[in-house]
Structure formats: C-alpha cells, structure tokens
Image: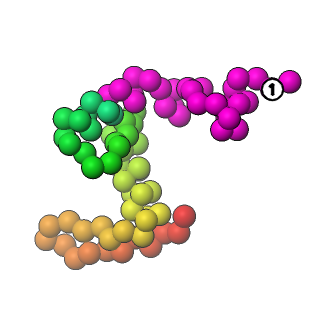
Amino acid sequence: MRSALDDQYEGRASGYTYAREGHPNADVVAAKIDALEAAPAPGIVLGSGMGAISAVYFWACCARATISSPGTSSMAAACAC
C-alpha cells in the first residue's frame, strides 16, 4: 500500500514533506522577492547565510561557471558534480 508521502517522493504528487526540502512560506517569500526585483528566473530561499554561500558555490561548480570579483583574476571552478 502506497502512502501520500511515497507518492510525493516518487513524483506522482506534489506537496511539502519536510521543511528543509521546501515549505509554503519559503515559496511565497521567494515569489514576492522575485516580483519586487523583476527576477528573470525563480529564486530560492535558504535557511542561513552559509546555506546561501554553499548554494552559490555548488551552482558555480556544477555549471562550470567562472567566478570573479573586482580586482582579482577570474578563477574557473575546478570541482566536478
């Protein structure tokens, strides 16, 4: 017998199962910030500054993006995802 939770985890149903995987409040906040900033793509809301920093570096690493900052040379992300 399958449960509603099984259906969510297996992609047959949508919903929220665990706050760290997303919750309605974070979705509403992200949508409102996207609207205020006229964001071209949907944003995400994370639980901490370290979570945000990690998300940026994981994204850059996985996208093989170039990370640069003013006054320094570009550094290609060297990790593999």
Counting other residues with Cα less than 10 Å from the Cα at mark 1, is it few (<14), some (14-19), or many (20 or more)?
few
Residue 15 belongs to magenta span: yes
Q: Is residue 67 above or below residue 53?
A: below
Magenta span: 1-29
Side of 75 relative to 36 (left or right): right
**Amino acid at circle 1:** Arg
Residue 70: tell me if it is visible: yes
Q: Residue at x 86, y 24 (%)?
A: 1
The residue tagged 1 is 2
Q: Is residue 78 above or below residue 38?
A: below
Location of residue 75 (image quadrant): bottom left
Q: Residue at x 51, y 26 (%)?
A: 19
Q: How is the image coloured?
A: rainbow
- Expressed as whole percent of the image width and height from the top left, the position of residue 5 reads 69, 26
Side of 12 relative to 48 (left or right): right
**Quarter of the rendering occupied by the C terminus:** bottom right
